[in-house]
Amino acid sequence: MRPRSPFKINADGSVKVTLAAWKRQLLTDLPSQLKELMGSNSSSNRRLFPNAYVGDEEREEEYQRYMREELLASRMAAATILSESAKKTQITTDELATWVNVCNSIRLVLGTQLDVSEDDDPIEPDDPNLQTHQLYWWLGFMVECGVQTLSKGFTS
Amino acid sequence: VPVVTPVRDSEVVSDTSTDIDRPWVVLVWNDPINLMSYVTYVLQKVFGFAREKAEILMLDVHQKGRAAVFSGAREKAEMHVFRLHEHGLWATMQQDD
């Protein structure tokens, strides 16, 4: 059975969040770990800071010189917003968009570490990375639910 | 015997114009991590696409490996690439040929 979405739009447009305390604790702690990782030069960062120009080193270097700092600042700010709002029972849709953004960033790091591919076999219960896989899956669920809630706000 | 050689003339003109006008194309690449629903959502959010258009582009990314989501001036292309990176999508830009 599919678990229920933790997000529900209130009549006033805000978002009601229903989550167990330990999950809120995860959403408080994971962004700090992400910030620490972003400050390092770990190779699990690579999906967070992709190249813009392919086959044009000069332009790529110039792009990174101007934009990398800005991208890092944006990611850091987003991580702070999630860890500071993770225990709220009511958030704005802007905050939810940030939750989705940061959960996705953490997935990018975990997915890189786990080296996931589109046709991976199901995870065995004795897999040494079982917990990381479960966290990866749960963050995917959070992203999916968040996107579903936020998409209701698009007028198209 | 023709007095002028129009072919050569037009070649010169078109060479100059393609160099200046050749648009920059922003590509989104397939990756095994980002969820399909998330890619659709980001394309709607960043470009203001209708859901149907965003879904078609997302399926192109998923099935063909990549999709062109923008074509135009370099500065604008860079801005879009930045926004897509901010959302964790794997985007690059290149000049159209």
Image (cartoon, coloured by chain):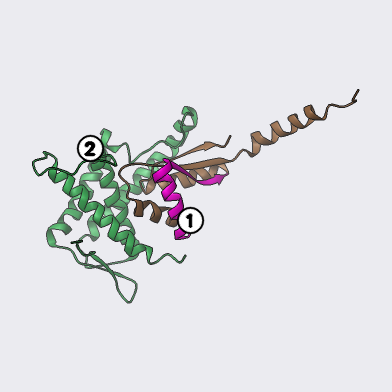
Chain colours: A green, B brown
Q: Can residue A146 be seen by looking at this rendering?
A: yes
| Residues packed near mark 1 inside 10 Å, few (<14), some (14 to 19) or many (20 plus) | some
The image shows residue A107 at horizontal and vertical percentages of 26, 46
Compared across the picture, whether A11 is left or right of B63 comes to left
Position in image of residue A39 (x %, y %): 27, 39
Q: Do circles 2 and 1 both sit on a common chain? A: no
Where is the N terminus of chain B found, in terms of image quarters?
top right
Q: Is residue A12 above or below residue B28?
A: below
Instruction: Please report the residue visible at 82 percent of the width from the left and 30 percent of the height from the top.
Output: B6
Residue B78 vs residue B22, the one in the foreground: B22
Contact between labelled residues 1 and 2, with CB atoms less than 8 Å apart:
no
Query: Can you see residue B83?
Result: no
Q: Which residues are magenta?
A: B48-72
Identify the image quadrant of residue B20.
top right
Provide the secondary structure element on which disc 1 rests: helix
- Residue furthest out toward the bottom: A11
- The residue at which mark 1 appears reads as B53
Any magenta on residue A3? no
Give the amino acid at mark 2.
Gln
Q: Secondary structure under badge 2?
A: helix
Q: CA distance from mark 2 to mark 1?
A: 33 Å
Q: Does residue A150 appear to the left or right of A43 in the view shown? A: right
Residue A152, compared with residue B81, is above or below; it is below
Position of residue A71 measured from the top left corner of the image (x, y, whole percent): 38, 44
Q: Position of residue A108 (x, y in %)?
A: 28, 43
Quadrant location, the C terminus of chain B: top right
Q: Mark 2 — residue?
A: A113
Specify the quadrant of the image occupied by residue A43: top left
